[in-house]
Amino acid sequence: MSRPVLGVLFSSRDWRGFLSGTGKERLDLYLKAAQNRGLRICFFRVEDIDLKSMKVRATVRTKNDRWLKVNMRLPQVIHNRAVRRVGTAEGVLKTLESRGIIIFNSWNNYGKLRIHRYIYSNPVLRRYLPETCRFTQSNLKRFLEYNSFFVKPDRGSVGRGVIKVSRLFANRWIVTRQVKDRTSTDLVRTDSLYRLLNKYTGRRRHLLQEAIKLLTYKGSPIDIRVAAQRDGSGKWQITGMAAKAARKGGYLTNVFQGGTVIRLDELFTEPMHRAVTRALSNAALEIAEHLSRRLPHLADVGFDFGISRDGKVYFIEMNFRDQRYSLMLAQMPDAYYRAYDNPVAYGQYLLTTMKGRSSRRSR
């Protein structure tokens, strides 16, 4: 009997990165996980799919360790690692789902404000949320009550376009922008602040977010990436977590912006390490469980949490396509491998569930 097949969908850019050796995705770890679980696995892009025949021109690894393009039927379960946008790709994936194919992490391009609102709708989870709202002139007036806050693109990644606004004194503000190792600042009066920020934000939707006084490492603020995934039983679990510290003088913790990844056991001694890990795990699992009731087939995410100086946990944002390199840079090989193994295990769980339902219907 042939082994079940799991598909992994990549964007063209990520696939080019794999072919050139510059990409972040580790196909070898997908292959290892699939082999250990008795699955076949194939890789493809949206443009490789033929809706008329329901076939795909996929890339597979042969027994001779060669990559081969093959025409095959579309797998019944697909792990989406491509950024899904409105357009042709959106129509293709919706059509597949309408024909009974399960695509987990199907839609992975939600705005930050929408996720904030989903979490806010649960009164129990509001305790994790810093004040956040859409960037408008009227909302900015309300945020002037804070001594510091951020202006962020509603959609974006790796810290691009995040502006920090800090009070200098009563009627003066410092507006700071950071791009990798470069930082630029503006000194502006209160009555000119909106005009300046509006110039930087342009027509893209942005949000305002309260700045939390975070724990620091060597004087730099830190946040913590928590990888949460469904496993082979379909349940959420924590795959791993690692701290990210901003570069000296910076405020962005993203590695792309010069941030440094640190293991939590290097930051905290026992019993603090155990307490922090427990608090972050609880927060991540609560939020993941809640969001998965709103977002069908959500299964593989990365949360960024901050911890305030008084020990409170704050949700900062959520990444639907966690690149997992925080775990690699933190030299956590077991957790890094699990980040690939869990989606494969969850795919196997879905394939088994579909097979079971099909068997019951045929009786």
Image (tube, helix red, strand yellow):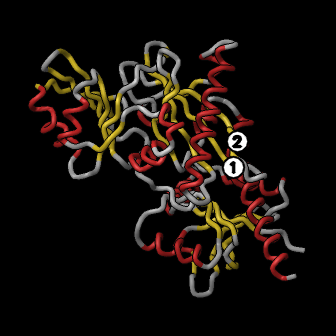
Which residue in the structure is indicated by mark 1? 230
Q: Could you tell whether 113 is left or right of 36 in the image?
A: left
Q: Nearer the viewer, residue 204 or 246?
A: 204
| Mark 1 closeness class: few <14, some 14–19, many ≥20 residues within 10 Å | many
Picture layout, residue 180 above or below residue 353? above
- Measuring from the top left, give residue 221's x and y in whole percent: 44, 21
Residue 35 is drawn in which quadrant? bottom right
Extreme residue toward the bottom, this view: 52
Q: Nearer the viewer, residue 322 or 359?
A: 359
* Residues packed near mark 2 inside 10 Å, few (<14), some (14 to 19) or many (20 plus): some
Q: Are marks 1 and 2 in contact (CB under 8 Å)?
A: yes
Q: Is residue 52 visible?
A: yes
Q: Position of residue 169 (x, y in %)?
A: 17, 15
Above or below residue 177? Residue 156 is below
Find the distance from the CA under tag 1 to the CA under tag 2.
Answer: 6 Å
For this view, does 172 lie left or right of residue 113?
Answer: left
Q: Position of residue 22 (x, y in %)?
A: 54, 49
Above or below for 223 versus 157? above
Q: Is residue 255 visible?
A: no
Q: Quadrant of residue 100?
A: bottom right
**Which quadrant is home to the C terminus?**
bottom right
The amino acid type found where label 1 is placed reads: Arg
Callout 2 secondary element: strand
Q: Disc 2 designates what residue?
A: 237
